[in-house]
Amino acid sequence: MRGLLLVLFMLPMVAQAAGGAWSATANGPLLANRGSWQRAQPLTPPADVGGEVSIINWRYELSRPAPSGLEVRLCGEQRCTTLEGASGTTRGLAHLNAGETLHMVFGFAGSGALPPGLRVVSSEVMVNYQ
């Protein structure tokens, strides 16, 4: 009986520490000009997510190799983190509300046109939270 009471007492703490994860995929924008930022479609969490972000895995794919000067950011409502490369892991949005919608934002330094047909084929995140 005592063991059962201990398990029942610990259950809420185990559930809270366990956390979870959600993933989302979105299509991206056409990238036509340097010197401007283009936001991909929203990466939206399920409605019942609670807690804080601990780590995010990301991946994006372009329709062709990226010209020089590509800058990519992963953003919540109030804060962004810079992403290095087409895939990876970041703690740059740690402690963000895990139920917040995210966006990838793509830009190129400088001015002038980019190669025709350059677009973001997909952007994906896997958000781990506690």
Image (tube, grey):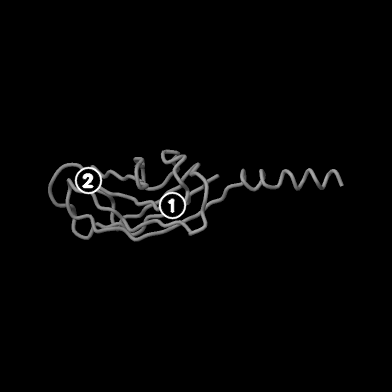
Residue closer to the observer: 18 or 123: 18
**Residue nearest the observer in this picture, 51 or 38:** 51
Count residues near mark 2 (Cα–Cα under 10 Å), then give few for <14, some for 14-19, many for 20+.
Answer: many
Please tell me which residue lies in front, 85 or 16.
Answer: 16
Residue at horizontal 43%, vertical 44%? 88
Crowdedness of circle 1 by 10 Å Cα count: few (<14), some, many (20+)? many
Vertical placement of residue 49 versus 96, above or below: below
Q: Is residue 111 left or right of residue 2?
A: left
Which residue corresponds to mark 2?
Answer: 108
Is disc 1 placed on a helix, strand or loop? strand
Location of the C terminus by quadrant is top right
Q: Position of residue 19 (x, y in %)?
A: 58, 47
Residue 89 located left or right of residue 4: left
Splitting the image into 4 quarters, where does residue 81 fall? Answer: top left
Q: Which mark is drawn over residue 125?
A: 1
> Which residue is drawn at the image coordinates 50% and 42% (left, top)?
54
Provide the secondary structure element on which disc 2 rests.
strand
Residue 6 position, x and y percent, is: 78, 43
Q: Residue furthest right?
A: 1
- Residue closest to the far left: 112
What residue type is disc 2 on?
Phe
- Asked if 26 appears above or below 81 in the picture, the reply is below
- Mark 1 residue type: Val
The image's mark for residue 91 is none
Name which of mark 1 and mark 2 comes first in the sequence.
Answer: 2
On the image, the x and y values in percent for residue 34 come to: 17, 48
In depth, the one of 3 and 33 nearer the eye is: 3
> How many numbered markers are drawn?
2
In this rendering, which labeled residue sits more in front, label 1 or label 2? 1
